[in-house]
Image (tube, grey):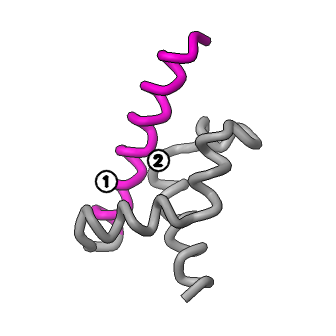
């Protein structure tokens, strides 16, 4: 996969996960973005670890939400 294509895919995936966090938990886009980028899971997704990027956006949103609640 070309590097540019990979970057576009990752940006699209991140945006969809953030939107799913907003939709599932009724929070603002800003809050969801903050939660996403502070999560360990987002780092793993962007690094391509464990094929997490292949999981559904809603599944990853719930995983990140649970991680956020455990840290709080």
Name the mark on residue 19.
1
Provide residue 22's location: percent of width, then percent of height: 30, 64
63 is higher (above) or lower (below) than 48? below
Principal secondary structure, stretch drawn in magenta: helix
User: Contact, CB < 8 Å: mark 1 with mark 2?
Assistant: yes
Q: Secondary structure at mark 1?
A: helix
For the residues labelled 1 and 2, the Cα–Cα distance comes to 9 Å
Provide residue 13's location: percent of width, then percent of height: 45, 39
Task: Give the quadrant of residue 3.
Answer: top right
Residue drawn 54% across the image and 83% down it: 69
Pick the front one: 51 or 45: 45
Residue drawn 49% across the image and 34% down it: 10
Q: Is residue 14 magenta?
A: yes
Residue drawn 61% across the image and 12% down it: 1
Task: Give the quadrant of residue 63.
Answer: bottom right
Residue drawn 60% across the image and 73% down it: 67
Which callout, 1 or 2, points at the residue further toward the start of the chain?
Answer: 1
Q: Residue furthest right?
A: 50
Residue pointed to by mark 2: 57
Provide residue 55's location: percent of width, then percent of height: 59, 43
Q: Secondary structure at mark 2?
A: helix
Pick the front one: 26 or 18: 18
Provide residue 32's location: percent of width, then percent of height: 35, 65
Q: Crowdedness of circle 2 by 10 Å Cα count: few (<14), some, many (20+)?
A: many
Q: Which residues are magenta?
A: 1-24
Q: Residue furthest bottom?
A: 72
């Amino acid at each position: 996969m070309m590097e540019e294509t990979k970057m576009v895919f990752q940006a699209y995936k991140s945006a969809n996960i953030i939107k799913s966090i907003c939709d599932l938990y009724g929070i603002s886009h800003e809050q969801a973005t903050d939660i996403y980028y502070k999560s360990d899971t987002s780092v793993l997704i962007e690094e391509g670890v464990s094929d997490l990027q292949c999981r559904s956006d809603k599944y990853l949103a719930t995983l990140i939400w649970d991680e956020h609640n455990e840290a709080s």
